[in-house]
Image (tube, helix red, strand yellow):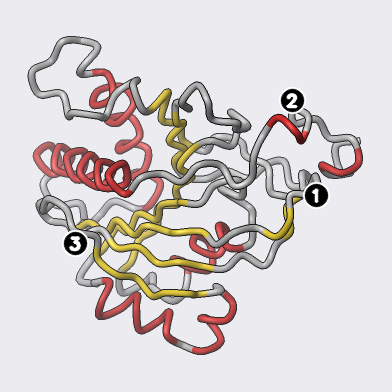
Amino acid sequence: MFARGFDEGFEVGLPPDEFDLPHPEVHPRVMLLLHQVLGVALEMLRVKHGSLAAFGEDPLTVQIHNLLENDLRQRRARGRADAIPGFDEGIFESVSRHSGATDYTGTKLKEEPDLYFKLKPAHHFRVLATEYAIFTECKPVDAKHAAGSRYWDDGLNRFVDGEYGWAMQDALMIGYARRRSIDAHLSPALRQPKRRAKLGIESLPRPIAGAKVPRAEALHVSTHQRGIVWRWNKGPATPIRVYHSWHDCS
């Protein structure tokens, strides 16, 4: 039963006429907030450890997750004066790491995005609660990990192919950058014709205006066509906006 997919009996919890695809877009202000919060978490790690150059993807992501969920998201509830406005239970129900996800077909049941920002839907939103989240991939970008390799092979492409965030219109990529930048390394890699076609690129990464985050680039966003068709007669998937939050981890 569990390999048959959504159209052949796999239960999502709601009949098709009770949820909409795509789910409501995430406002850019929310993505800018996450960019800021990630900057705070990484600065906390720098204060404790100094250089972050020796940390691999998983050790960095685990510590960032712990700071986000156990400290930063809880500060307002604890009456902390240093709470970050907006990063609390009013918008985010939880932050998870390697939370189990299902692809758009309902046949891949063990997809594990690096971080999963569970969103709190407004009362009138017709969403699948399990899918209403900012699915996030974290990748190093350095001399050993080119922007045109793991960052898109094991990260960006998952959103385009409908493995993660298939019900959403927005997703997040976090770059642990070491002497690499979006303009000099990511954008040129995405301009390559084969890669541009593979990733359905409608628009290359462009900066989003917002408050400067120390030791981070401006938040960027790119737009991608998804060559997938939603189940339940919901039609072809809409494009997805992928935000790029790159932080200096030298």
Which one is in front, 113 or 132? 132
Which one is in front, 133 or 186? 133
Which residue is labeled 2 in the image?
Answer: 13
Q: Which numbered disc flags the more N-terminal residue, 2 or 1?
A: 2
Q: CA distance from mark 2 to mark 3?
A: 40 Å
Q: Is residue 184 left or right of residue 222?
A: left
Q: Nearer the viewer, mark 2 or mark 1?
A: 1
Under mark 3, the amino acid is Glu
User: What label does residue 76 carry, if any?
Assistant: none
Measured from the top left, where is residue 57 in percent x and y?
38, 52
User: What label does residue 233 carry, if any?
Assistant: 1
**Residue 216 sits above or below residue 47 on the image:** below
Q: Nearer the viewer, mark 1 or mark 3?
A: 1
Q: Quadrant of residue 37?
A: top left
Under mark 2, the amino acid is Gly
Circle 1 SS class: loop
User: What label does residue 217 carry, if any?
Assistant: 3
Measured from the top left, where is residue 236 in percent x and y?
70, 60
Measured from the top left, where is residue 54 in percent x and y?
25, 54
- Residue drawn at (80%, 44%) of the image: 232
**Residue 209 sits above or below residue 145 on the image:** above
**Residue 203 sits above or below residue 241 on the image:** below
Q: Which numbered disc flags the more N-terminal residue, 1 or 3?
A: 3
Q: Residue furthest top?
A: 78
Residue 146 appears in view: no
Residue 156 appears in view: yes
Q: Residues within 10 Å of mark 1 (few under 14, many from 20)?
A: few
Under mark 1, the amino acid is Asn
Q: Residues within 10 Å of mark 2 (few under 14, many from 20)?
A: few
